[in-house]
Image (cartoon, grey):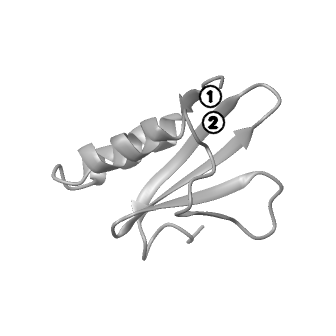
Amino acid sequence: MDLFKIDPKESFEHDLRKIDRQFIPRILEAIESLSENPFPVQSKKLKGSESSYRLRVGDYRVVYQVDTENKVVTIYHARHRKDVYKR
């Protein structure tokens, strides 16, 4: 099976700086696993979007999009569950 390329956006890197250091390794590990399977059991499709998903990692949510044609997973945000869906 071909691996998906992980493409973190600047917004994701900005979010990582705000997260408590003890949670970062778990979040990064979960994101790396998306290269093998971009649709794990703990992910859910976001309403109102064609290709946006969220991945639950403890109290944090990783928001990403999957381009199955080009095999790219674009990571947009990693935020606490109380803040992730606010605009």
Report the mark closest to the observer, 1 or 2.
1
The spot of residue 68 in percent (x, y) is: 78, 35
Find numbered disc 1 in the image and state the secondary structure of the residue it sits on: loop
In the shown orientation, is residue 40 left or right of residue 80? right
Quote the CA–CA distance across marks 1 and 2.
Answer: 6 Å
Residue designated by label 2: 73
Q: Is residue 81 above or below residue 30?
A: below
Q: Tag 2 or tag 1, which sits nearer the N-term?
A: 1
Find numbered disc 2 in the image and state the secondary structure of the residue it sits on: strand
Q: Quadrant of residue 14?
A: top left
Which one is in front, 82 or 65?
65
Question: Which residue ends up furthest to the left in the rendered image?
Answer: 22
Badge 1 density bin: few <14, some 14–19, many ≥20, Cα 10 Å: many
In the shown orientation, is residue 87 left or right of residue 15? right
Tell me which amino acid carries mark 2.
Val
The spot of residue 54 in percent (x, y) is: 58, 60
Residue designated by label 1: 4
Residue plotted at (65% across, 26% down):
1
Q: Is residue 9 above or below residue 1?
A: below
The numbered dot on residue 16 is none
The spot of residue 28 in percent (x, y) is: 35, 41
